[in-house]
Image (cartoon, rainbow, N blue to C red):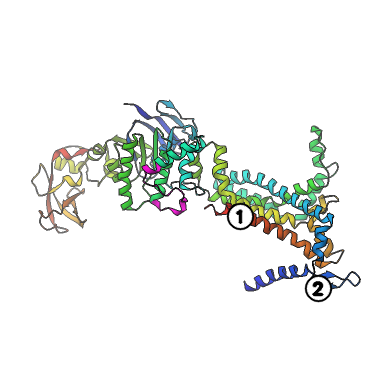
Amino acid sequence: MTIAIALQELRKNFGEVAAVAGVNLEIADGEFFAMLGPSGSGKTTVLRLIAGFEIPTSGSIKIAGEDVSKTPPFNRDVNTVFQDYALFPHMTVQKNVEYGLRVKGVAKAEREVRALRALERVKLVGYENRKPSQLSGGQRQRVALARAIVNEPKVLLLDEPLGALDLKLRHEMQKELKELQVQLGITFIFVTHDQEEALTMADRIAVFNQGQIVQVGSPKEIYEQPANEFVAGFVGISNLLHPESSREILGKAGTFSIRPEKIKLGHDLERKATGKVSQVQFLGSFTRIDVELAMGDTLTLLQENDGSSLASPVVESLINISWDSKYEFQVG
Amino acid sequence: MFWLVVAYLGSLATMFASAFWTVDSFTGNIVRHFNFGNFQILFTQSVYRVIAVRSLTVAVLVTLFDALIAIPIAFFMAKVLSQRLRNFAIVIIILPLWASYLVKTYAWRTMFSDGGVLVWLLKPFHINPPGYGLFATTLTLAYLWLPYMILPIYAGLERLPDSLLEASSDLGASAGKTFRQVIIPIIYPSIIAGSLFTFSLTLGDYIVVKIVGGKSQLMANVVYDNVGTAGNLPFAAAAALFPIATILGYLYFVRRSGALENF
């Protein structure tokens, strides 16, 4: 495994505030890597440190083995897709895409060929002579992508790339970004606060909180085996059994997390509990049921609307729930 | 609004009409008889051509000088200073506009005077600064109109998102290339706006050249002298059309270049 990016004890302070408080991370060549976390968790600052827009307070950044901690952005072999796309308003789509090649002195003929190829990749051929102001949000996003990949960087950095798009377009672009990454074979690192986006697109995810990485793993690991209460709560719906409930129901000490779709109605499975229904929400393909246990914890479960189950439980009524012990994970 | 337009454009129209009248050289009364006599004099007598070229040169130099100083200052204010220091800098830029124009011009007169601070400053370098004349006029005018150039450029730079500068750098452009390829084209309309101020204010000024210009005269002095001493209002009106025509020509040139339709 070749390492594309290696961060060592990376720190960045803004005045008194430590935006990044000691991050260690290795990202492999060709990986689709997500940095997930709430706003202010330091994920965007880490991306900006890798791009070179911020200078680390301490620690090192290596790109393909080479220490670039003090290298200015224009000498780093990474390119960025900005959250606001940052297209040059006075240039056409063609000129925007060619920009990186032009400032590096690539000849006009080659520039045109490579720009066209990049525009083909993002399915935007035919828009070469438009100005950014004449494009929709989704099209601008594609121009920003083309402008970055035309330079064939080792690593592509994407800052909340889909944040400004509507839901339908976002799903479409998620698929396309993934395809593009597979085609190009270059490392993609993207920052997002949307857990669903991270889970669907990434090979691996780093979850950030308060300037530090709290867990790194595959989407499945992050989802099924959250390392602590924060990850369990931030990724997916939080179902926590605090120590009193754990002792009562599981006979174990500590805090445990169970994903809602693993909990079933009735007492058919290994772990059994009884509680009062506090809320029932119809969500279309699922019904979300919140059950308040005697010890004070609330468990959420998702009942599939496949016609097999009886009518939804009534609020305030007592119901039985159960799950398999292999789906409970200690988070504290 | 309506009356404002009438009063403003009406007086301009009156001036335009009166430029085609003459003054009876014996009685001094205005003869309302349409003719091109004033323009004939302006175009054929070499003294007016010299003054026109001189005025244009001074205006162009003042504008270039102001642009050269204003762009780095405005950039520093908009992109380097913190929000608090930025407001403070704006106050500092505007502050000289509250002081009397005459006081500032006389201050420059003192500095350019024989044995003044400029002579004293440049003496160790064995440079003899030029005394009163066109150089002093240009410098003083550039000083006076500098805020009018800084403020529009600052406004333009403040609207320019930082991410554009980062994107340019990210794509491999050095600071110099980013400046030429991204910053200048985007703030071009702001520079044009500033240059309209410096250009027209310079063409309309007759006081600075009287105070620090030595014997030199600019186009506005022709207007002034014909209004006052000579009492030839029609000729003054004709001469006053010069800056208006120049600015209109400049605007037409800018429009034709397409630099304002970039967005």
State which tag comes first along the sequence, 1 or 2.
2
Q: Residue furthest front?
A: A109
Say the numbered circle drawn on residue B256.
1
Of A77 and B4, nearer the camera is A77
Give the SS element for disc 2. loop
Q: Which residue is mark 2?
A: B33
Residue B128 position (above or below residue A276): above
> As shown in the figure, which amino acid type bears the numbered disc 1?
Arg
Q: Residue at x 32, y 34 (%)?
A: A31
Provide residue A6's location: percent of width, then percent of height: 38, 29
Looking at the picture, how far across and down is residue A7, in whole percent?
Answer: 39, 30
Quarter of the figure with residue B207 = bottom right
Q: Is residue A129 at least partly visible in the picture?
A: yes
**Residue at image x 37%, y 48%?**
A163
Please check whether the numbered discs 1 and 2 fall on a single chain. Answer: yes
Q: Is there any visible trace of residue A207 in the rendered image?
A: no
Viewer-closest of A229 and A181: A181
Q: Position of residue A166 (x, y in %)?
A: 34, 53
Residue type marked 2: His
Chain letter of disc 2?
Answer: B
Dot 2, crowdedness within 10 Å: few (<14), some or many (≥20)? few
CA distance separating discs 1 and 2? 37 Å
In the rendered image of this protein, does residue A48 appear above or below residue A93? Answer: above
Q: Quadrant of the C terminus of chain A?
A: top left
- Magenta range is A118-137
* Rendering coords of residue B249 (x, y %): 68, 57
